[in-house]
Image (cartoon, helix red, strand yellow):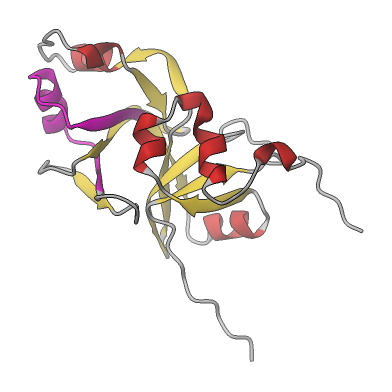
Amino acid sequence: MIKEQAFESLTGKFLIAMPALADPNFFQSVTFICEHNEEGAMGLMINRETEDVTVGEVITQLGLDWPEQNIADKRAFLGGPMDTDRGFLIHSPVGNWEATIAVDDAVNEPLGITSSLDIMQAIAQGDAPRKMLLVLGYAGWGPGQLERELAQNAWLSGPGSQEILFDTPCEDRRVAAAALLGVDLSLLSSDVGHS
């Protein structure tokens, strides 16, 4: 009798695209897993800044008044290929918002993933969370899909880190996330071979 493997949630962890992952949507990406259960997974890429969308522009598009603040020029991130017109805010502290998922990254205090307008109104009024990333779109996986991709070595999974999310430069996040696992990405090959 084959023993069924227990489900292990990756909520609060990073997925790091392996070099052989050729899908252009995820090539060299780092994705923060917001929710993962037996029904599927949802994540937000955290290392792809948009070319031209800033927090200030999103606030303006929402029709909110914008006070002079230094966060207006922060770039939004491309969170994934699904629903790219939908915004999510990864933030700390969690706070009390209308549509928030609290995610424990197992390292620091829980993070909030909020998609409701009330947090954007607060930011426009000068009451931004202490740390935040604005992400447009998301990555989603159906039941068992992420587990299959992990088994095929498309991804490395490792601990989440608020320092990497909020304090590490965007271009360094992939290497930093892999380093938490003791992995040097420059030593990994994109070639898959069998002996």
Between residue 45 and residue 140, name the one nearer to us: 45
> Does the segment drawn in magenta span residue 128?
yes
Answer with the quarter of the image where residue 2 lies.
bottom right
Residue 8: image location, x then y, percent: 46, 67
Q: What number of labels is visible?
A: 0
**Looking at the image, which residue sits at the far top?**
68
Residue 94: image location, x then y, percent: 18, 44
| Left or right position of 28 against 159 | right
Between residue 62 and residue 6, name the one nearer to us: 6
Residue 98: image location, x then y, percent: 12, 42
Q: In the rendered view of the protein, which quadrant contains the C terminus?
A: bottom right
Answer with the quarter of the image where residue 19 lies.
top right
Q: Residue at x 12, y 18 (%)?
A: 124
> Does the segment drawn in magenta span residue 76?
no
Q: Is residue 8 above or below residue 113?
A: below
Between residue 142 and residue 158, name the one nearer to us: 158
**Looking at the image, which residue sits at the far right?**
195
| Left or right position of 15 against 152 | left
Q: In the rendered view of the protein, which quadrant contains the N terminus?
A: bottom right
| Left or right position of 127 against 84 | left
Q: Is residue 176 above or below residue 147?
A: above
Q: Residue at x 77, y 41 (%)?
A: 189
Stretch in magenta:
111-135
| Left or right position of 150 against 109 | right
